[in-house]
Image: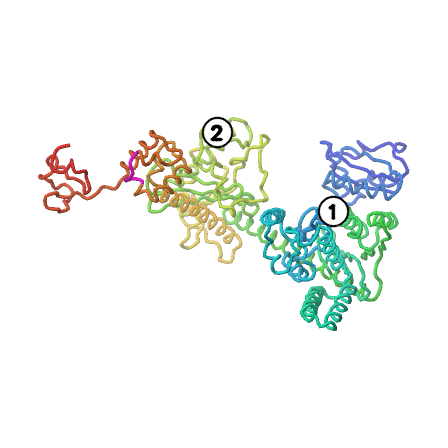
Amino acid sequence: MADPSSYRPKPGQIPDSPGVYRFRDEHRRVIYVGKAKSLRQRLANYFQDLAGLHPRTRSMVTTAASVEWTVVSTEVEALQLEYSWIKEYDPRFNVKYRDDKSYPYLAVTMNEEFPRVQVMRGHKKKGVRYFGPYAHAWAIRDTVDLLLRVFPVRTCSAGVFKNAARTGRPCLLGYIGKCAAPCVGRVSAEDHRELADEFCDFMTGRTGTYLRRLEKQMTEAAEEMEYERAARLRDDIGALKKAMEKNAVVLADATDADLIAVAEDELEAAVQIFHVRGGRVRGQRGWVTDKVEEITTGALVEHALQQLYGEETGDAVPKEVLVPALPDPVEPVQEWLTGRRGSGVSLRIPQRGDKRALMETVERNAQQALVLHKTKRASDLTTRSRALEEIADALDLDSAPLRIECYDISHLQGDDVVASMVVFEDGLARKSEYRRFQIKGFEGQDDVRSMHEVITRRFRRYLAEKERTGEWTDEEPDGETGDGTGSDLDDRDPKDRDPRDRGLKDEDGRPRRFAYPPQLVVVDGGKPQVAAARRALDELGIDDIAVCGLAKRLEEVWLPQDDDPVVLPRSSEGLYLLQRVRDEAHRFAITYQRSKRAKRFRAGPLDDVPGLGETRKQALIKHFGSVKKLRAATIDQIREVPGIGRKTAETIAVALARAAPPAPAVNTATGEIIEEGEPDTTAGSPGEPVPAGAPEERRGQEP
């Protein structure tokens, strides 16, 4: 912990002018970025008695090791530079709003020769018009499906567009009138761009003028007795009105505005935003953030505005932004928004009328989001903590077992014996550290012996690495594979991969192998399995890892030193966590065992041919139709398959002959099938039966 006085600048060094400052830690990483109207006054607030600082501010200044600043001309420049540095350095002590999901937008790619309407997520691209965000992608597709009837803009991908242009045939939408088919030249690029512009105009809220124009055209068509055209226009008007009905009118004066509400407590804040265009709610989004610094509601609003509009320009910044509290000072923020839009932006607090009523709705959404977030988080933390404490009490552990490893053995009547290791940390599955084992030490079914082997192999490696390096390392010894040390990680079921742990690697970029020892080892089984696990640890000299077993029959917890089980209440959170761990180990083991069994069953005689890969195997089967026909083929016939030479053909023929099922022996004189061991004295050498279908020269004489 650093002493702020050790890096405090001298009073005369700090300028009394607007600027942006950065606190860095001992590793020169930026941990906080702030702006100030007066750098001297603002920085002086950080270098006072630590007892008078807010706990979060005190944590920041004691973590920092230096401070630096940049002087700017105006507060607007300070706001822009602060936003840029927060995006660049991602400082840990700054409030950062992050979406709880990637919201979809309706996008029109006006930067292409033939603009395309599509759903887009992620970072916005230059030259693309965006509308939204929407809560669900299907809501966008429903709206687009209705509007394509009136504005048949291209929606296909570049590949489909090029293929249609090459073949001269449009896609299905072109045939049913929901695409103008510019790919085959039905409309020019200029006419198609005009359609896209009209689509964008409608989406921005300019709907009344367009509807009135369509109604006028419908009336004129009816008067001229062009009834089919009039009916088409009538249906177009109905489709547009149906699309408009999907967004209720909330502001009667066709206002374009964003409404931002904040719900907060001492630790967290939830932000909700309603995007209103043309008086209708076109999109909604929300964030929840930890308050890692002492901050006011106005400052939270300022950070939210930076997050919302930091990379937006033009119409993406609305004319009006309604907020629950104004930043202090408000003028630089308002000037910055005006610069982003290119015209005046009103930043204010709604006081009365429809806008105030809508703001109350947004505030209720923010409050509900915060309550829901806290309920989930508190429930998770409380339940997991209670479960770990109950396990520690029941097993008489010194502390709660923050890392639990569970092992299970799986086989099918003694075949394909495998084991699994699953890891739970803080009561949550850590799927990236799951491991699988093949039992190598013996053949057959012996769960106790298998458990002893698995525990021994897992912790022998742990001890070898500890002895070699003197610390916990992630490297695996050379020449050992197939024993659950990660060689099979890439072919795990996708649901057994943990995206949170992507990038869990050592300094050399290799995945970590058995990096940490557990506080508790759980085995699936009763007293024999627990005793085997404890014996394996004792043989390795490990005495600081607890062991228990969970028997399925009565859900009893067995300890190696006790003759009687520990019985946890059925309502115990600790028992529920142990059951989850045990069931996950069982699932992981049986999945691996089934995959091995299926792979063995799929094996065929061609698998034993050295140097014959999957491609040539498939070529052989495709050429002959079946292994049976391939077995009956001559070497010259096998050589007809592309890529098969004489030597390979001979090897294939020999391998198939060895793997051929024995044919029943036949008495060539009588036609009877001879039982095994019964001599056939009429053909071949004494006592040697002749297989059915043998060559003629072998019948009745010595070869």
Q: Quadrant of the N terminus?
A: top right
- Name the chief secondary structure element in magenta: helix
Q: Residues within 10 Å of mark 2 (few under 14, many from 20)?
A: few
Q: Amino acid at mark 1?
A: Gly
Residue at image point 10% right, 35% down: 686
Q: Is residue 211 left or right of residue 529?
A: right
Query: Residue 636 is drawn in which quadrant?
Result: top left
Q: Quadrant of the C terminus?
A: top left
Between circles 1 and 2, the one closer to the viewer is 1
Question: Quick one: which residue is furthest to the top in this view?
Answer: 468
Coloring scheme used: rainbow
- Name the residue beneath numbered marker 2: 477
Query: Residue 609 is drawn in which quadrant?
Result: top left
Q: Secondary structure at mark 1?
A: loop
Residue 426 is marked as: none
Position in image of residue 181 (x %, y %)? 65, 54
Examine the rendering and report whether any part of residue 10 can be seen.
Answer: yes
Q: Secondary structure at mark 2?
A: loop
| In front of the other: 346 or 154 | 154
Q: Is residue 222 above or below residue 632?
A: below
Position in image of residue 389 (x %, y %)? 56, 49
444 part of magenta stretch:
no
- Name the residue beneath numbered marker 1: 127
631 part of magenta stretch:
yes
Q: Which residues are magenta?
A: 630-635
Q: Earlier in the sequence, mark 1 or mark 2?
A: 1
Q: Are marks 1 and 2 in contact (CB under 8 Å)?
A: no
Distance between the alpha carbons at the discs numbered 1 and 2? 54 Å
Question: Quick one: which residue is furthest to the left in this view?
Answer: 681
Position in image of residue 126 (x %, y %)? 74, 45
